[in-house]
Image (cartoon, rainbow, N blue to C red):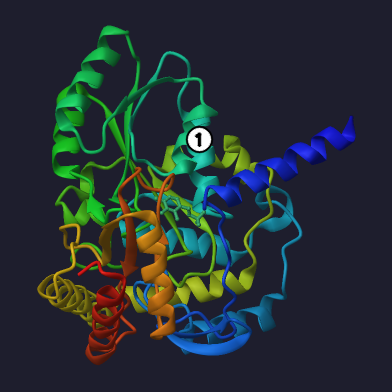
Amino acid sequence: MRQTFYNRIADTIADIHDQGLEKIERQITSPQGPVIEVDHNGTRKQVLNFCANNYLGLADNPEIVEAAKSTMDEYGFGMASVRFICGTTDLHRKVEKEIAAFLGYEDAILFAACFDANGGVFEPLLEAEDAIISDSLNHASIIDGVRLCKAKRYRFPNSDMGALRKQLEQADLDGARTKLVVTDGVFSMDGYIANLREICALAEEFGALVMVDDCHATGFMGPHGEGTPAHCGVAKNVDILTGTLGKALGGGMGGYICASKDVVHLLRNRARPYLFSNALTPALLGATLKTIELVRNGGTLREQLFRNATRFRKQMTEAGFDLLPGEHPIIPIMIYDARKAAQLADELMEEGVYVTAFSFPVVPKGKARIRTQMCAGHSDSQVDTAVAAFVKAGKKIGVI
Ligand SMILES: *Cc1c(COP(=O)(O)O)cnc(C)c1O
């Protein structure tokens, strides 16, 4: 009996491998950054990194590292408790208040990850008589969180505002008590920005609430890095905002939910990934306070990030590559063919540029791509070097 289980697991692994879907983890042997050292066929190789979520280049920032060290000296290593028993330090509340103030909310609540924040946000707030209306491309953690909640589920195709209107109408017909529209602020495979202006207008018209998961935007989108709602001019219209400390905000780990005081209060009492999971370690919180300070004064970093994005887009387009349109520092290079995309990524590694190929099931069949992500830590000339490598590798593979 047990052997059949282990045989089945082995078969599944073989299947994943045969379909070319196996995820291979390349080992980095340096700090995360715009330039990293990786293990390449058994030797260490220095490469330009164009596939981290390190948008502002803060992952190895010396001031943040120093803040983590000094906080660890002062507060020790671990909390060994959930928040409500004996796991809340003054730092936990300070970070929550700083995040809320930065993003323009009454309060915020920390989680071990945004995956947990999204997993825990719906169930305490909505019940069977309520409705969740969700974009079809929303992050896996939102999908899981919605599944854990008894509210009725409605889905609309990615950014299809006509379909969203229909689902709002349907939810009304079904007698929904509360309607919550939920969307990613930025869709990570395409770098497309949610149409929050229209979503908020529709929500207003139908008396619905809006929740935005802004993991790929907080820190760099919007005039001062407040994210997609500010970028779209609807900062005051988003009821619930979730985000991560694992991307632009230092890239460590941790997630949060920003909302009204009462919503946060209820989540502290009912959100299961919060109630039944350890408090964040103090070093991370000390580092996060420094990160928020750097981000709030991060105009120069944001300028460099978007300058890199514009420069890369322009040169890659001129070179004949097929890019998805947009303004976000996620810049997908469309290859369409999965094998060619993988070959191109391999060839770029040889040229000293680290990028990742994405194919089905992460993106639709026939839509394979190299998803590049810009970083404020790259200089103009490093962007130029990456483009030159793309051109050389692209010609070799025959995609330009
Ligand atoms: C990365 C990401 C998450 C998960 O964040 P973690 O803090 O790494 O768990 C959730 N939602 C979106 C849209 C993301 O991009």
Image location of residue 55, percent across then percent down: 35, 72
Image location of residue 374, percent across then percent down: 30, 73
Give the quadrant of residue 273: top right
> Is disc 1 placed on a helix, strand or loop?
helix
Residue depicted at 24% across the width and 76% down the height: 395
Position of residue 75 relative to residue 31, above or below, is above
Indicate the quadrant containing the N terminus: top left, top right, bottom left or bottom right.
top right
* Residue indicated by mark 1: 145
Out of 367 and 127, give the one closest to the viewer. Answer: 367
Position of residue 274 relative to residue 3, above or below, is below
Residue depicted at 49% across the width and 42% down the height: 141
Name the residue type under label 1. Gly
Out of 327 and 225, give the one closest to the viewer. Answer: 327
Q: Residues within 10 Å of mark 1 (few under 14, many from 20)?
A: some
Image location of residue 161, percent across then percent down: 16, 32
**Does residue 277 appear to the left or right of 293 in the view shown?**
right
Out of 169 and 107, give the one closest to the viewer. Answer: 169
Residue depicted at 47% across the width and 30% down the height: 146
Residue 345 appears in the rendering: yes
Indicate the quadrant containing the C terminus: top left, top right, bottom left or bottom right.
bottom left
Give the quadrant of residue 384: bottom left
Residue depicted at 30% across the width and 76% down the height: 396
Residue 218 appears in the rendering: no
Image location of residue 231, percent across then percent down: 18, 57
Q: How many labels does the image show?
A: 1
Give the quadrant of residue 88: bottom right
